[in-house]
Image: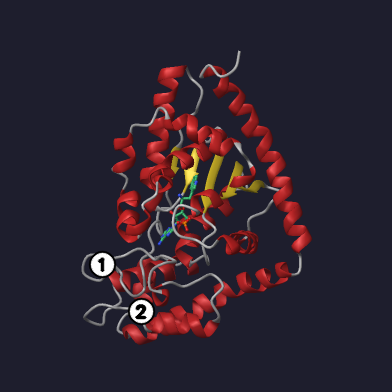
Amino acid sequence: MRIFSGIRPTGEIHIGNYLGAIKNWIALQEKNECVFSIVDLHAMTTPYLPQELQKNIMEVTKVYLAAGLNPEKCIFFVQSQIKEHTELSWLLSTVTPIGDLQRMTQFKEKSVKHKRDVNAGLLNYPILMAADILLYGTDLVPVGKDQKQHVELAREIARRFNKKFGKTFKEPEVLLPKTGAKIMSLQNPEKKMSKTDNPQGCIELLDKPDAIRKKIMTAVTDPGKEIKYDVSQKPGISNLLTIYSLFSGISTTDIEKEFEGKGYQTFKEKLSQLLIEKLEPFRRKKKELELRQTLLEKILEEGRKRAQIIAQETMKKVRKKMGLLK
Ligand code: AMP
Ligand code: TRP
């Protein structure tokens, strides 16, 4: 299977990104042809600092590698280095109805959040994402739940293109993790954990032990004192149980049993310890990579070369089909 996914180089990577997406990628790279991209062009649709973009790209590169992405088993590259992404994005925009873009949940949410900068890039974001996916003949797109709608639109765009110009693209499918597709904010369990949300509600992969403990101990919980998985009645505790389960490999039912009659405090202390222990290797490996700038550049350059070959081949076909080539 050909797999494609991307992550925006905006600030730190949190455990929601990890459990919702990256963890899945690491498992998938063993038996599939995986292509993973740092999507810097997507990061430009919301306010950002140009002088920080390169630094953020390198940060994300190091976190990916520290988390277990293996450049010998996948293609790992920076989106803007392959011009075919922007070219295909334009061509696909000519088969995408504006209404489809305007009804996207992320567009609606971000338009409210960034009221003063509702740029056309924010509206066209899913077309660029479709271009990312379709360029590489992707079968499966592993993402968190918030991106499902965008992958479905990419599928729709592929279908529409094929109908109009003849079979060209595979119709990609979304791949969500069974649990962890939507990790919620520790401070507001009704909202997804997000980098731009309240930082206290978001545990970063590289958080130090003190920060982890503080965030878990102050996480919003629910009335009562039972440790029970019940999303509608106990969204806070259920979110913590999900995190506990995914990092420990123990089912939520078994965790409930372990903490029967023990109360929130004990549960949170154990969860803090678990996270401190499980996140330690990320920080260690990331630190090692700080000293390997040349290696990092080599990895991204190698990824660029390999991605380029596939992208150019696809574009040749697309140009022909659309009448841009003889
Ligand atoms: P982003 O940081 O928005 O580029 O997201 C990168 C990946 O992480 C995407 O596949 C998202 O769907 C996923 N993701 C982001 N936030 C969460 C969350 N709170 N829970 C689960 N997955 C998430
Ligand atoms: N839009 C995705 C996000 O915010 C990132 C992304 C860009 C992506 N292109 C992609 C994900 C292609 C999967 C496939 O998380």
Tell me if residue 314 comes above or below residue 124 in the rendering: above
> Mark 1 near ligand 1 (CB under 8 Å)?
no
258 or 301, nearer to the observer: 301
Quarter of image, res 277 = bottom right
Q: Residue 105, labelled with which disc?
A: none
Q: Residue 219, labelled with which disc?
A: 2
Please give left or right for residue 304 compared with residue 177 in the image: right
Tell me if residue 272 comes above or below residue 99 in the rendering: below
Disc 1: CA contacts within 10 A as few (<14), some (14-19) or many (>=20): few
324 or 200, nearer to the observer: 324
Please give left or right for residue 125 compared with residue 280 in the image: left
Q: Is residue 1 visible?
A: no
How many angstroms separate mark 1 from mark 2 (CA)?
17 Å
Dot 1: what SS? loop
Q: Residue furthest front?
A: 116
Q: Which residue is drawn at 37% across and 59% down?
A: 182
Number of numbered discs present? 2
**Visual colour scheme:** secondary structure
Please give left or right for residue 109 compared with residue 27 in the image: left
Q: Which residue is drawn at 56% across and 38% down?
A: 85
Q: Is residue 178 visible?
A: yes
Residue type, mark 2 in image: Ala
Residue type, mark 1 in image: Asp
- Look at discs 1 and 2 and give the one toward the viewer: 2
Q: Name the residue under label 1.
A: 230
Q: Residue at x 35, y 51 (%)?
A: 106
Q: Residue furthest right?
A: 294
Dot 2: what SS? loop
Q: Whole-percent x and y of residue 208? A: 55, 80
The image quadrant where one finds ligand 1 is: bottom left
- Image quarter hosting the C terminus: top right
Which badge, 1 or 2, comes first in the chain's sequence?
2
